[in-house]
Structure formats: structure tokens, C-alpha cells
Image (cartoon, rainbow, N blue to C red):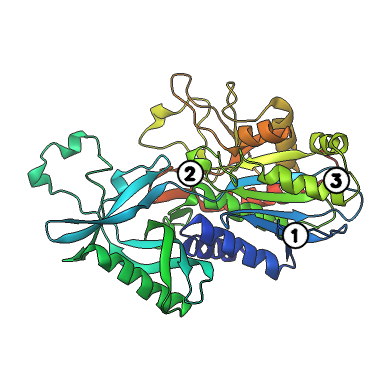
Amino acid sequence: MSQDDLIERLLDFLRGSPTPWHAVANMAARLESAGFRRLDEREPWQLAPGEKIYVTRNDSSIIALQLPESELNALRMIGAHTDSPGLRLKPSAAQASAGWLQLGVETYGGVLLAPWYDRDLGMAGRIHVRHPDGRLEGLLLNVERPVAIIPSLAIHLDRDVNQGRPINAQTQMAPVFLQGGESADLERLLKAWIAEQHGLEGVELLDFELGFHDMQPPARIGVAGELIASARLDNLLSCFTGLEALLAADGRQGAVLVANDHEEVGSASACGAQGPFLRNVLQRVSDQLGRGGEGEFIRLIQASRMISCDNAHALHPNFTDKHDAAHGPALNGGPVIKVNASQRYATNSATAAMFRDLCREAEVPVQTFVTRADMGCGSTIGPITATELGVPTLDVGAPQWAMHSIRETAGAHDVEYLIRVLTAFCNRAELV
């Protein structure tokens, strides 16, 4: 497959995944088209060597497994997360001001707020309804047209705005939705969109998890097309590369892709990395394939390795002083090993050495990021998964600019680089 075809597939995935629920639905569709069988956690499982399986939880987290053709003695795990910072609707969202219906929002994760102003906003998420016969159902909703905007205040009315000022998410971020609208209009419109997208009439709205998303489509930009600009690159880019690697693997080894929800808010949930989802699934797989018992499960986990994939901070040409002088990853310079002595990243010298050897094998350049000693460091699912499961782990990611903005930027070549090395990881016979 050409790089152009690969990037177009990534852009399609980004465009069609405005929420974690949509991302998981799209990943599940790709897995099923590749022969993966869906399992239900509520049912007993019957597994066989060489099978391809996947399971979801909350419809926003997913685990896919390529079971080994022979004995299950080690797993090659790739981790990512499906959620991105953004604006989520409050349960009673409708509010009127100055003749306009606006929708109250709360921030999800560490949102970079300023770029949300003056954007064409669509709405997407999950809605639960009651059918006329009493049946309850969860539905995905994606309003793929501009229905709201958060207008900036004119500079004439705020002469000091370019000097920088705090943004109040409660009073200054409510999107403008409908002129002259009232509270009942939100429910009326949601029902109309449900009818339009699902052909359902007469349903009762029970609850929803909805948010706004930028309607500007993902794009390949730059004079030579060397950049990708899109919403939710953090961390759907890692979900995409992990999935591509799993599907491109030769299938002989035991390989796992886990994409958790709720990383941006701490991972403490039933389907987050701090929850039991991954352990539950791997324990059942271990029990099924003849490695029953806690002792055997521990042996399996200690023989396995986890690569946690979450984008890294690329060196910004306008803010070079924000990086340590010796650790400024470049876009299109290859995947980045993320290191932090205080264990904000899970990398150690042993797991980093393994990844460097994989990059050598795959002929992929590799970089390293360490935050400045006088700045705080973010974190990922890597340390959380290592803590919960005990698996030797490292943190890597594609470099990007504008992390947590409504529109982020990454290098087009880094997509192929990361897929290539993750595929080599899935195919490696011996883990060290």
C-alpha cells in the first residue's frame, strides 16, 4: 500500500470518529472485515489457538487479540486511548441568553480552549432511548453539519485580548445553537436527528453523552504534503497505527491491541486503563488456552511486553525554549521514546532497548523526549497499565504540535514509521 493510500485511510478514520464510541465502532468494523470474531463479556468463551477475537466495554474501549498458533507463552501488547479533550454537553444543557438558545458545556480533559472560538461545530455522541414497546437502546449520533459556534468577542470590546486573559469555561464557552430557541427545541432536534440517522420515530429520550466537534475535515497539508492536520490526533493516530500493525502482522505470535477510554480524565473507570478491563480479558484468555491459575497468569504477563502509544510533544519552531535542548523530537523524524525519571512514563532502559532494536530491524528512525527539568510532565496509560497488570512497558508516540487543541498537527511520514515498527513488534518471535 502506498503512503498516500495509508494517509487517506487515516483521514477517513479521523473524519468518521468524532467520539470514542464512533472510534470503537469503526475499529470493530475493520476488525470484523479482517476476520476477527466479537466476544461478549457476559457470555462464556470458547477459544482456540490462532483465533482472532475482540471485545468492547462501554462501547468506548476495545481489546483485539491475535491468539498464537502454538502455545500461549507471551503477548505483544499495544496500548492507546480513544478519548480526546473537548466540550461535552451538560445533562440540562439548554440555556437562553439575548434571544439565543445556547448549550451549556463542561470541559472534558485538559482542553486548549482558545482554538474552539469561531469554529463550525457539529455534535456527536451516544443517546439512550426507550422504544414505544418499552425496549431500551443506545444509539450513536453524528450531526455532520455545522449546528453551533462559539463566537469571539470583537477586539473593539476587549482591547487587551491579545495580551492574554483567562477563559471562563462556565460563562464564556457556551456555543450559540438556535436563534429564538427554547429548551424544548433541543429535544425536538435530537429526535429529528435520530429519525434522520436511524429511521426511528416515537422514541423517548432518556439520557445522552454528547459533545461538539470541529467540522473542518482532516487534511494533508504543507507544500510537500508532509503534515497532517486534524482534530483528535491525540490519540486516534495511535489507535489507527496500532490497529494497522495488528492487521498487518503475520498472525503467528500472540498480539493484543487495547484502546481504553477516559485516559484524558485519569483512566479511573470500568473501561479505563486503571480499571479491570484488560486484566479481565487476558485472564480469561489465559484460562482458556491452558494456562489456568494465578501463577501461570503472572508468568504470562512477565514474559509479555506492552508498548503504550500516545503522541509526543514535537519541537515547536516558535517555542524552542519549551524543550530540553537535547530532547526536541522533530515531525517526520520517527517515533519518540518518552522518558521520565519520576515514572510519568513507564519506559525503562530495558524496554527502551527493545524498542530501539525493533526500530533498527524495521529501518525506522527513533527519537527521545524528556521534559525540561523545570516543567511538569504529562502521563499516559503506560504507567497505569504497568501498575495494574505488572507488564514491562514503555511509552512511545508520534511527535505532534498543538496537543489538546481542537486541531492538531503531526508528520505524514511518522504514520508509516510507527506502523512499521509496531508490526515488527507483533511479529517478533522472542521478546527480551
| CA distance for labels 1 and 3 | 32 Å
Image disc number at residue 429? 3
| Residue closest to the eye, 298 or 223 | 298
**Mark in the foreground, 2 or 1:** 1
Q: Identify the disc placed on residue 43.
A: 1
Are circles 2 and 1 on residues that touch, CB within 8 Å? no
Q: Look at 79% across and 37% down and name the residue there.
A: 301
Q: Is residue 173 left or right of residue 307?
A: left
Residue that protrudes farthest toward the front in the picture: 134
Q: CA distance from mark 2 to mark 1?
A: 41 Å
Secondary structure under badge 3?
Answer: loop
Q: Is residue 215 at least partly visible in the picture?
A: no
Q: Where residue 68 appears, x then y in whole percent?
A: 85, 53
Q: Sequence order check: which comes first, mark 2 or mark 3? A: 2
Residue type beneath disc 2: Gln
x, y percentage for residue 128?
A: 47, 64
What type is the residue that disc 1 sits on? Glu
Q: Secondary structure at mark 2?
A: strand
Residue at 54%, 51% in the rendered image: 82
Q: Nearer the viewer, residue 315 or 128?
A: 128
